[in-house]
Each structure stands twice: as structure tokens, then as C-alpha cells.
Image: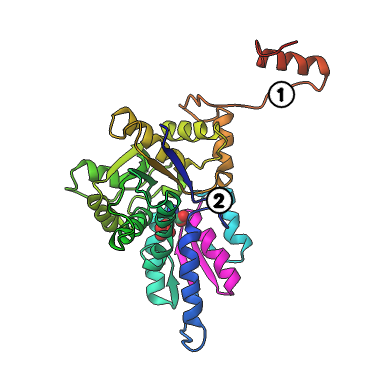
């Protein structure tokens, strides 16, 4: 595909696209808490699969606002867990999944003066929609054909729609791209809803997925996402664990260091290309949502071929060699077979 692009939204302060919206939200809370408004907001809280909590904690620390984060125990990466801890947030590790954390934070914020920072808060989406505006600007206001976004809690797919639609209303562009929401097959309530012809939405208990940031079975922005997809003649696609890990690893071979969620979006692209839905020359943007360094554990497992029932076809394990010249030369000659001009 000559016109395929990856929009990196994870090369940012806390390593994910959540920075775009969280800086807006925390800035607004800061304004509300300060004179002359002096609103009695004791802190800002969120449920998270790791990226939202990292962004919230960082911006709250900078603003001197207490952050409270609810995380599902053992369901986020180590790097994501340590981010709010390091930034001094109050971290509650809860014996439930993300959806359980989400339910609890909604109950708690209804009782206590804690401002809810999840993406059902439209301030977040106002920030996140800037990625869509930036894409248009980067293409000199030529509208791409497709935008592929990984989806879990589903605020982001709507934020993209909001950004594109705003530019269309302002007549900066004359149309909006078609949106594709890509889900992990282990956490695919939107995909199943789409497949039912939007007849029947059933929240689910999301199973474990390497794309842990989108391991969500009851997305809070389901209605907004469906609205965005219907308005853009959008598509929902899914990726199995093997498909997403292979796609991520293949992307890494090009010099990226993609996260598993970017793998989900890339796997969706491969499927849509195979079916001829996305054409060779279509300008297509795959949204990369987080920095791969947050997911080193799963990359190590893949490259060590430690994942049960997965061929790990792009695994590139380190070669253990004795530290002597002969042994090293043997390995290199074998590796570079036919490419050495000695
Ligand atoms: N993937 C998210 C889950 C929370 O979603 P949000 O859209 O409400 O921020 C995360 O990184 O925590």
C-alpha cells in the first residue's frame, strides 16, 4: 500500500494518546479549583487499564491536584502500574476487571467530591479529537479514506469522529474518512453488536488479551461509538491474540516499537485488505495508541516463544553464545549465510 500511514499518538508525555484529552481535563479542573471559582473538588479519579491512569496522575501531579486511580489487579502492565505510583497518585488495586473498576469509580464519584476523568467526560474527547485535526493538517487538508482505531472503552473512536466532523462543518474539508474500530477478539462487544446489524448490544466479561488496555466488556461510550460508525459508514473488525501479536511484531520489524493495540488495528487492516474492502491505493491511517515500551513483558514473551498455542512467527530470540571469537564467528557466519563477501 503506497499510501499507508501510522499516526503515532503514543510518543507523548506518558506514552499514550490519553495525554491529549487528559491535559484538557486536568487544566479545566485546575481552573475550577482555583480562585475565583474555588469549586470544592477534592481530587480527580478514574478507572483504568493503565494509560488513562498514567496520564491523569502525571497532569494532576504537575497541577498539585490529588489523583485517585482504580486499577484491575494483575491486568495491566508493570510499566503502566508504576506510572501512577511514581507520580504520587492514590492507587487502588482492585480484585476485579476494568468494568468492575469503572462501576466502582462511578459510584464513588457520585458520593464524594471527586471529579470523574474517564472518557464519558466530554472534556477528554475535546482534547483527543485534536488527533483527527492534526491528521488533516498533516495531509494538507486532503481527507484520508480510512482511519483505523483500536477500541476498548470507545471514547477515542468518537473523538476522531468529532474532530473530523468539526473540520467538515467548518468547511476545512468536504467529507469525513470512513472509520474502522478494531477490537481484540477476546474483548469484542462492539464487534458482536456490529455483526448483529446493530440489533443487540450485550455487555460481556472481557477475557484476557495482550491488548490489555482495551480489555473492556462494557464500554462507557458504546452509544457514541455506534453513532460515529454509522455516520461514517464505518466498520468494526476484530483480531485474535495471535493475529494482534504477529501484526505488532511485524510492525516492529519496520523500525516501529508498536503496542499490542496498534497490533489489533494493523491486524484489522490486513483483514480488510484481504477482503478487498480497503483498496491498495486507499489512503489509510492506522492509529497507534501507546508506546510499545509499556508492553515489554508481552513482547519478551512473544520473542521467547513462551506463549501457549501461538507460533510466534516473527519471534527473534537472543542467541546465547560462549564469549569466545570462534563461537561468535560460527553464529554470525550461519546467520549471514551467503551475505558475507570474505
Ligand atoms: N483504555 C483505557 C480505559 C479507560 O478508558 P477511558 O476512555 O475512560 O479513559 C485506559 O487506558 O485506562
Few, some or many C-alpha atoms within 10 Å of disc 2 (few <14, some 14-19, many ≥20)? Answer: some
Identify the image quadrant of the C terminus: top right
Q: Is mark 1 within 8 Å of ligand 1?
A: no
Confirm or deny contact between disc 2 and disc 1 (CB under 8 A): no
Q: Is residue 51 above or below residue 63?
A: above
Q: Earlier in the sequence, mark 2 or mark 1?
A: 2
Q: Nearer the viewer, residue 228 or 6?
A: 6
Residue 331 point in image, percent of width and height? 71, 16
Q: For the image shown, how many numbered marks are present on the structure?
A: 2
Q: Quadrant of residue 185?
A: top left
Residue 164 point in image, percent of width and height? 34, 56
Quickly name the residue at label 2. 11
Quickly name the residue at label 1. 320
From the viewer's perspective, is 79 left or right of 229?
A: right
Magenta stretch, residue numbers: 44-73
Residue furthest out toward the right? 324
For the point 53% across and 26% down, the residue is 314
For the point 40% across and 43% down, the residue is 285
From the viewer's perspective, is 298 left or right of 143?
A: right
SS assignment at label 1: loop
Amino acid at each position: 500500500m503506497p499510501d499507508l500511514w501510522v499516526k503515532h499518538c503514543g510518543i507523548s508525555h506518558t506514552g499514550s494518546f490519553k495525554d491529549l484529552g487528559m491535559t484538557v481535563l486536568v487544566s479545566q479542573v485546575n481552573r475550577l479549583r482555583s480562585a475565583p471559582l474555588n469549586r470544592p473538588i477534592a481530587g480527580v479519579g478514574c478507572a483504568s487499564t493503565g494509560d488513562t491512569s498514567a496520564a491523569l496522575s502525571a497532569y494532576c501531579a504537575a497541577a498539585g491536584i490529588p489523583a485517585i486511580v482504580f486499577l484491575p489487579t494483575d491486568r495491566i502492565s508493570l510499566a503502566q502500574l508504576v506510572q501512577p505510583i511514581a507520580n504520587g497518585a492514590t492507587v487502588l488495586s482492585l480484585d476485579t476487571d476494568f468494568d468492575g473498576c469503572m462501576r466502582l469509580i462511578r459510584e464513588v464519584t457520585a458520593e464524594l467530591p471527586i471529579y470523574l476523568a474517564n472518557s464519558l467526560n466530554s472534556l477528554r474527547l475535546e482534547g483527543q479529537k485534536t488527533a483527527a485535526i492534526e491528521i488533516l493538517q498533516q495531509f494538507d487538508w486532503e481527507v484520508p479514506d480510512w482511519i483505523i482505531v483500536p477500541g476498548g472503552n470507545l471514547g477515542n473512536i468518537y473523538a476522531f469522529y468529532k474532530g473530523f466532523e468539526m473540520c467538515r462543518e467548518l468547511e476545512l474539508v468536504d467529507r469525513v474518512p470512513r472509520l474502522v474500530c478494531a477490537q481484540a477478539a477476546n474483548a469484542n462487544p462492539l464487534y458482536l453488536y456490529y455483526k448483529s446489524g446493530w440489533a443487540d448490544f450485550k455487555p460481556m466479561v472481557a477475557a484476557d488479551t495482550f491488548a490489555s488496555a482495551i480489555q473492556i466488556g462494557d464500554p462507557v461510550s458504546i452509544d457514541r461509538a455506534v453513532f460515529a460508525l454509522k455516520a461514517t459508514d464505518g466498520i468494526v473488525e476484530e483480531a485474535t491474540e495471535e493475529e494482534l501479536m504477529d501484526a505488532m511484531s511485524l510492525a516492529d520489524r519496520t523500525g516501529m516499537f508498536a503496542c499490542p493495540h496498534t497490533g489489533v488495528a494493523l491486524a484489522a487492516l490486513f483483514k480488510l485488505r484481504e477482503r478487498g474492502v480497503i483498496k491498495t491505493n486507499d489512503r489509510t491511517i492506522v492509529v497507534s495508541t501507546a508506546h510499545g515500551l509499556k508492553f515489554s513483558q508481552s513482547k519478551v514473551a512473544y520473542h521467547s516463544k513462551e506463549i501457549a498455542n501461538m507460533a510466534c512467527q516473527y519471534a527473534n530470540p537472543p542467541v546465547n553464545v560462549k564469549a569466545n571469537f570462534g563461537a561468535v564467528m560460527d553464529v554470525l557466519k550461519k546467520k549471514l549465510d551467503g551475505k558475507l563477501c570474505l
